[in-house]
Image: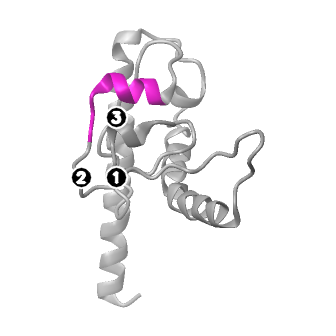
Amino acid sequence: MDKKSSLIICTNFCNGKKHDFKLFKDSKVRWVKNIQGIVDSGYIGIKKLQGTSLAPNKRTKGKPLTKEERRINQNISSKRVLNENVIGRLKRFKILSDKYRNRRKRFGLRFNLIAGIHNWELMHDNRNQNTRKAIGS
């Protein structure tokens, strides 16, 4: 997802239950060094694959987080809110929130169509807002 525009850039999915980080590793998708990926705490070890990624710190059983680490985690979470909002918008389409009961072959096509609809709506809304600003209403 693009942070500035909230447009979906890349999608990936698999059959059955698979952890997000495992799916990321298997996909071989990587971003360039000047791009920073913001991930959740499930992506432990992503810094080995992507040095520019931001992942929150996790406390261990005997060692709680320091105030500085909590502040950093809060900063990362505030940046991740945009991603979570986009995921929430996509879940309005029941294909993502409920069990998928159609042919598995078509899931990728349908998911990409939903992402395209999301992107189109964002671009369409932004164009209307710019038009309203130009008109002065």
Residue at point 39%, 19% (across, down): 107
* Residue shown at the point (50%, 49%) measured from the top left: 55
For the residue marked with disc 1, what is the amino acid?
A: Thr
Give the residue at x 62% y 60%.
69
* Badge 3 or badge 2: first in the primary sequence: 3
Task: Report helix, strand or loop for mark 1.
Answer: loop
**Marks 2 & 1, CB-CB < 8 Å contact:** yes
Answer whether residue 68 is magenta in the image: no
Separation of residues labelled 1 and 3 (CA atoms): 20 Å
Most frequent secondary structure within the magenta stretch? helix
- Please tell me the numbered disc located at residue 11: 3
Outermost residue, right side: 62
- Vertical placement of 95 versus 82: above or below? above
Magenta residues, start to end: 21-30
Residue position for label 2: 33
Disc 3 crowd rating (10 Å Cα; few below 14, some 14-19, many 20+) is few
Question: In terms of image quadrants, where is residue 49?
Answer: top left
Residue tagged 1: 52
Please determine whether, in this image, residue 117 is positioned above or below residue 20. below
Please give left or right for residue 75 compared with residue 8 in the image. right
> Dot 2: few (<14), some (14–19), or many (≥20) neighbours within 10 Å?
few
> Which type of secondary structure does the marked residue at label 3 adopt?
loop
Kind of residue at badge 2: Lys
Question: Which quadrant is the C terminus positioned in?
Answer: bottom left
Q: Which residue is nearer to you in this view: 130 or 26? A: 26
Label 1 vs label 3, nearer the camera = 1
Q: Is residue 1 left or right of residue 62?
A: left
Find residue 65 and report its horizontal and vertical position in percent: 70, 55
CB-based contact (under 8 Å), mark 3 and mark 2: no
Q: Quadrant of residue 68?
A: bottom right
Q: Which mark is residue 81?
A: none
Say which amino acid is labelled 3: Thr
